[in-house]
Image: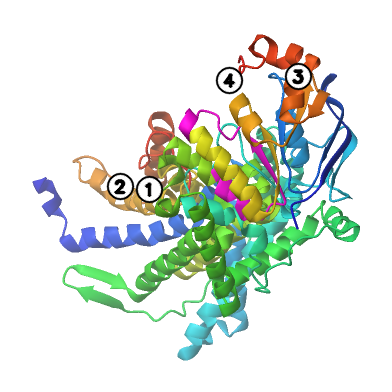
Amino acid sequence: MAGATLSVRGLGMRFEGLAALADVDIEVPGGQIRGVIGPNGAGKTTLFNCLTGFYHPTSGEILLDGARIDGLATHEVSALGVSRTFQNIRLFANMTAIENVLVGSHTHITVGSGERRAPRRPSGHRLLDAARKIPGAPRAAGSAINELAGAVARPPAVRRVESEATDRARRLLQSVGLQRRENMIARNLPYGDQRRLELARALATRPRLLLLDEPTAGMNPQESASMVGLIRRIRDEFETTVVLIEHQMRVVMGVCEQITVLDYGRRIAEGSPAEVQQDARVVEAYLGTRAGTGGGHAAP
Amino acid sequence: MSILFLTTPEFWFDQIVNGLTTGSIYALVALGYTMVYGVLQLINFAHGEVFMIGAFAGYGVLLALGGQDISGVMIVVALVLALIAAGLASGATAIAIERLAYRPLRNAPRLAPLISAIGVSVFLSHLVDDGFLNGETKHYDQIFPAGKLSLGALNVSYLQLFLMGASLAMMAVLYWIIQRTKLGRSIRAVAESRDNAALMGVDVNRAIVATFALGAIMAGFAGVLYGLFFSSIRGSMGFIPGIKAFTAAVLGGIGSIPGAVVGGYFLGLAETVGRELLNEIPGVNLPNEWKDVVAFALLVLVLIFRPTGIFTQQEGKRA
């Protein structure tokens, strides 16, 4: 199992007449590290918002291992194995590092039955089930009561699952190098550590598709280089597909196996880093006069 | 302040105990205001009626178990059953209110759910008063053993001891749920960022329902304690304690759980001890009813000068 295959077909997202995305096709094979680049306003973050169910696209479809995920609620998309980090870090600032990671594990701690859900393999059937739940009417009340009872009574099974989740959260913190920061409040962590924590939290949802929005933003060259190593290690260790938005060309060229270029909401090029760098449309739209310099941020 | 010696130490201890007793009730009810505000930024003005429903549920259970005739070990059983019934009734009421009156307005302008809340509040209090009771007042049977604990100048009735102890225990359990369980983490995550919590797989609706339910259970418990202590209950009984508890939540910084507790006790003390302190000024004689004036004057002053609460950092940190 090497991460989920992502297929985006004819994706369009309009905001009151403005087409933020138009007819975008992207195919990312399982386990690949894909870069998405493009000038500001090209639609990169809108694409991520569509992939996570935060926006519901106005046309086209999004498939994860062949099953539709567009139209599902955010927490359902998360449960199917799509996770992300943000350009401007969005941790739960008043929680400790380990609590942040534990929130990410929530879909995998099932209080009540005390059983962990099986690893997700989206079948059409499961997705149908998830889709049916969207109106989510009395179900939320029922499961909230169930969970309340579980939280108070805490049968041994619940305690076991919680302690397993805590162990796993510790391992995740360790794999991003934050083992000593477990009980620090997130907002007090140094900037680089906050980025790492956001990554650990994203991993806690057991993603099969990990979306990273400018993972090295605000980092110095050494920190960026170590983040590149971390992204590769995570792809291998956690068997996930990675799609990342990045402005630092050194990072894009160093870590991405394939690159998709967006401009004004359209896909204008796709290929290996070398191919993309040679592409005339890309040079014109994005790399501009900086073509081939391979360093630093694009013009803001 | 030599003037204080005009009244006896017993008198002041009584005032403090009374303040802490009513403060316990305010604190329990304030928790529901502050938690719901934390996740939805909504002032749930129907919360006072949720408290009233709990008081009636407890009353019904005590009546069914024999009312005045309950004695011996049955007192303990009856109290436990009354508290459970109140928690369930209040919880169910709050879940229904959330579903019917607030969720359809989740994305409406902020004024809409607030007005809806006031509507639910008026509806429930009149439903009980005019629909069921014909304006009648009911009275809790005084089943709790009379008598008091005396330590020098300090006198505390057993009922007051029970009330303060039970409140503390309930708040401790709530605090533990919020801080240490998965459910509590998901509530805190939603309070910090609804979108972000959903992205991490938290079922936001479920966390919101649980928040309402937890706050309502505390209010239901408070309703029973109120009935045991003040005896008379009616459909409109939730109004003043509800607004007092809201005041307590604002005093402590709305959205903050420890703030609601501190604010509750502070308000209880302010309106009893505070009023009596004012009475020490020569020529001032404020009767008991003035405690409401003290409480609401505090609310206005806090809203003007420290709208984020008097015990919080200026940013008004959330729970």
- Which of discs 3 and 1 lies nearer the camera? The answer is 3
Q: What residue sits right under mark 4 in the picture? A: A297
Chain of residue at mark 3: A
Chain of residue at mark 1: B
- Relative depth, front residue between A276 and A134: A276
Crowd class of label 4 (few under 14; some 14 to 19; many from 20; radius 10 Å)? few
Whichever of callouts 4 and 3 sits on the residue coming sooner in the sequence is 3
Q: What residue sits right under mark 1 in the picture? A: B291
Chain of residue at mark 4: A
Q: Are marks 1 and 4 on the same chain?
A: no
Q: Is residue B224 above or below residue B73?
A: above
Say what amino acid the circle numbered 4 marks: His
* Residue at (51, 78) in percent of width and height: B79
Q: What residue sits right under mark 3 in the picture? A: A278
* Residue at (22, 39) in percent of width and height: B283
Say what amino acid the circle numbered 3 marks: Gln
Tell me the number on the disc at residue B275.
2
State the CA–CA distance, disc 4 to disc 2.
65 Å
- Which of discs 3 and 2 lies nearer the camera? The answer is 3
Point out the image quarter for the C terminus of chain A: top right
Q: Which residues are magenta?
A: A198-222
